[in-house]
Amino acid sequence: MSKLNEDALHALKVAFCYMPKAIEVNEYDFAGRVDKVLADIETVREILLINDTDPDEVYGDINPDDAPNSTY
């Protein structure tokens, strides 16, 4: 799979910030779609990793003033 250009990667990062976290996905909020939503989240995470981007660091990269400070 080829890597995304910078604009497409930035757009994916922004969209990922608005996606629910896997732990937030439940049957109440996503009735009948839990497996699909979780698969979609995993797909986006995989594409970020292919593009040398840690999905767990995306929010801080996009919103540095709003991200919690790391202490390690």
Image (spheres, helix red, strand yellow):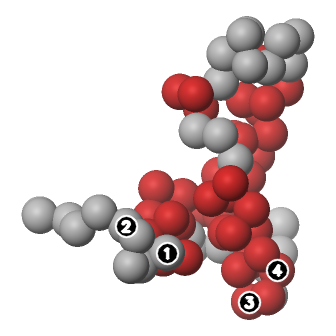
CA separation, marks 3 and 4?
6 Å
CA gap, disc 4 to disc 1?
Answer: 17 Å
Q: Which residue is mark 3?
A: 6
Asked if the residues shown at circle 3 and circle 4 are in contact, with their CB atoms under 8 angstroms apart, the answer is yes
Image side of residue 22 versus residue 18, left or right: left
Given the image, on which type of amino acid does mark 4 rest? Ala
- From the viewer's perspective, is the residue at label 1 or at label 3 nearer? 1
Residue 46 picture location, percent across and down: 68, 52
Disc 4: which residue: 8
Q: Quadrant of residue 66?
A: bottom left
Vertical arrangement, residue 8 with respect to residue 66, above or below: below
Residue 49 in the image: state x and y as whole percent.
60, 62
Q: Amino acid at mark 1?
A: Asn
Q: Is residue 70 left or right of residue 44?
A: left
Name the disc covering residue 67, or none: 2
Relative depth, front residue between 30 and 13: 30
Query: Counting residues from the N terminus, which is met first, the one under dot 1 or under dot 3?
Result: 3
| Amino acid type, mark 2 | Ala
In the picture provided, is 22 more to the left or to the right than 40? Answer: left
Mark 2 crowdedness (10 Å alpha carbons): few <14, some 14-19, many ≥20: few
Which structural element holds mark 1? loop
Between circles 4 and 1, the one closer to the viewer is 1
Between 68 and 57, the one lying in front of the other is 68
